[in-house]
């Protein structure tokens, strides 16, 4: 039996940020509301496109694994905010990381995208079709925000995370997964004005995120908890066997509700939404990487992950870590420098949204 072991991990958070207090200078909101309703304190704003964020995260994961990029068979990029639709964004990343022998493909399952992509790449390795893959999740959510709408503008951020998967005889990597989609409710979370369902000859206005927060909240808690139960059954594990839950970071209260339902203590739940907000598909990839960096993932750790997003897609995964929790080589990969603050970066969009 072949497994798809995680041998490298990397993340890329753009340097510019906007705190809640700074946000309240451009949106009718305040730190107290955002913190108590969502757990978010700050979010990163990217000065580069999605492909560039993805490339740096992927290069860092490749260095962490200590592999040659020409040996990679597949570059799979989970994103719902691609730099370009045609050519796909993964082809840009494949070029920029030097993975010249790899297939390159984008996958869109919104916030569930990383776990969906992990499942797809793992299945190809397990089937013996490929040996090495880099699975990336990268999003530039700030690009789609309407800065005149306080209900959505405060929740999202930009970033990317990546893992390298390598064929191995050791039972490690994604060992059980459950993915699904409640399409009957797909209307309650979507980005408008960005597809071929629009009239290309009419002025549409900018794209924009729409959602019914309370409906999503209920469905996210139920969907992610039930998917976790399913995965535990598949893996023949008890909750007590799980060392760490790495949930999608959409809202701290959603995470806490799942934690409560699964009866997990605080030290078994990875949380970083306070720093980065909701980076859609990238939240789990970033959180997984940060959990290793914080020492929360030890050799052979049993990790549970769960996601929920537009579609309404959902996913849960049981991941068994390998032996190594430190990089093989330190990465020199960096984003181009950014000479603007977060507020300066969004100001043109703020003025456009406010009609000025
Ligand atoms: N600052 C201040 N007040 C605000 C803000 C803000 N940023 N946004 C909304 N309000 C006001 C509303 O106008 C409303 O005022 P009113 O009572 O005078 O009408 C009041 O706050 C309550 O608004 P609700 O939308 O009912 O607030 P709720 O408690 O539901 O919290 C939230 C909203 C945080 C979005 C919550 O519903 C939630 O966490 N939902 C799930 C997460 C989610 O939907 N994320 C986006 C989708 S992406 C994903 O990853 C699944």
Image (cartoon, grey):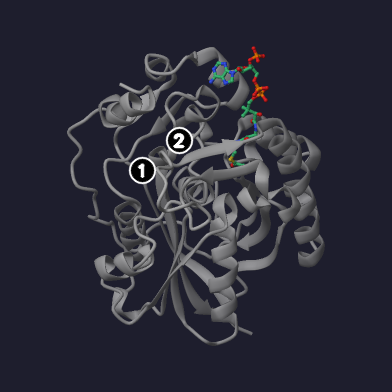
Mark linked to residue 13? 1
Q: Residue 108 vs residue 55: left or right? A: right
Classify the position of the N terminus by image quarter: bottom right
Q: Is mark 2 within 8 Å of ligand 1?
A: no
Residue tagged 2: 276
Q: Quadrant of residue 144?
A: top left
Q: Position of residue 354 (x, y in %)?
A: 37, 22
Relative height, residue 346 to residue 101 (above, below): above
Q: Quadrant of the C terminus?
A: top left
Within 10 Å of the Cα at label 2, are there few (<14), some (14-19), or many (20+) other Cα atoms? many
Quadrant assignment, res 319:
bottom right
For this view, does 12 lie left or right of residue 207?
A: left
Q: Nearer the viewer, residue 132 or 51?
A: 51
Mark 1 crowd level (few <14, some 14–19, many ≥20, 10 Å Cα):
many
Identity of the residue drawn at 49% across and 13% down: 30
Task: State whether residue 226 is above or below residue 220.
Answer: below
Q: Earlier in the sequence, mark 2 or mark 1?
A: 1
Taking the image as drawn, is residue 45 in sight? yes
Image quadrant in which you'd find residue 9: bottom left
Residue 162: x and y in percent read 43, 58
- Disc 2 and disc 1 in contact, CB within 8 angstroms: yes
Q: Position of residue 107 (x, y in %)?
A: 50, 64
Residue 71 has which mark? none
In this rendered view, identify the residue nearer to me: 17 or 239: 17
- In the image, what residue occupies the spot 35% across and 52% down? 50
Where does ligand 1 appear, by image quarter?
A: top right
Residue 94: give x, y in percent of width and height.
32, 70
């Amino acid at each position: 039996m072949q497994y798809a072991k995680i041998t490298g991990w990397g993340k890329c958070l753009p340097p510019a940020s906007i705190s809640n207090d700074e946000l309240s200078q451009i949106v009718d909101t305040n730190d107290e509301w955002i913190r108590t309703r969502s757990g978010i304190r700050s979010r990163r704003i990217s000065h580069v496109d999605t492909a560039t964020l993805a490339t740096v995260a992927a290069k860092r994961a490749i260095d962490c694994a200590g592999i040659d990029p020409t040996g990679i068979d597949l570059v799979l990029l989970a994103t719902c905010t691609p730099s370009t639709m045609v050519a796909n964004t993964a082809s840009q990343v494949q070029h920029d990381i030097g993975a010249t022998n790899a297939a390159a493909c984008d996958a869109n399952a919104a916030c569930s995208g990383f776990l969906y992509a992990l499942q797809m790449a793992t299945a190809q390795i397990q089937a013996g079709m490929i040996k090495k893959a880099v699975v990336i999740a990268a999003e530039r959510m700030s690009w789609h925000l309407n800065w005149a709408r306080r209900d959505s503008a405060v929740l999202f951020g930009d970033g990317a995370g990546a893992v390298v998967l390598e064929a191995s005889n050791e039972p490690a990597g994604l060992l059980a997964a459950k993915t699904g989609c409640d399409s009957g409710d797909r209307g309650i979370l979507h980005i408008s004005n960005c597809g071929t369902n629009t009239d290309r000859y009419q002025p549409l206005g900018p794209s924009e995120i729409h959602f019914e927060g309370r409906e999503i909240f209920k469905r996210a808690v139920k969907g992610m908890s039930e998917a976790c139960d399913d995965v535990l059954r598949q893996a023949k594990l008890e909750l007590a066997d799980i060392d760490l839950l790495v949930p999608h970071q959409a809202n701290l209260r959603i995470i806490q509700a799942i934690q409560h339902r699964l009866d997990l203590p605080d030290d078994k739940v990875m949380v970083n939404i306070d720093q980065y907000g909701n980076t859609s598909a990238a939240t789990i990839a970033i959180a997984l990487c940060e959990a290793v960096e914080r020492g929360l993932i030890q050799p052979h750790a049993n990790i549970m992950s769960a996601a929920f997003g537009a579609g309404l897609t959902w996913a849960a995964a049981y991941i068994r870590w390998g032996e190594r929790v430190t990089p093989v080589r330190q990465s020199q990969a960096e984003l181009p420098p950014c000479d603007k603050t977060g507020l300066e970066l969004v100001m043109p969009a703020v003025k456009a949204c406010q009609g000025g």
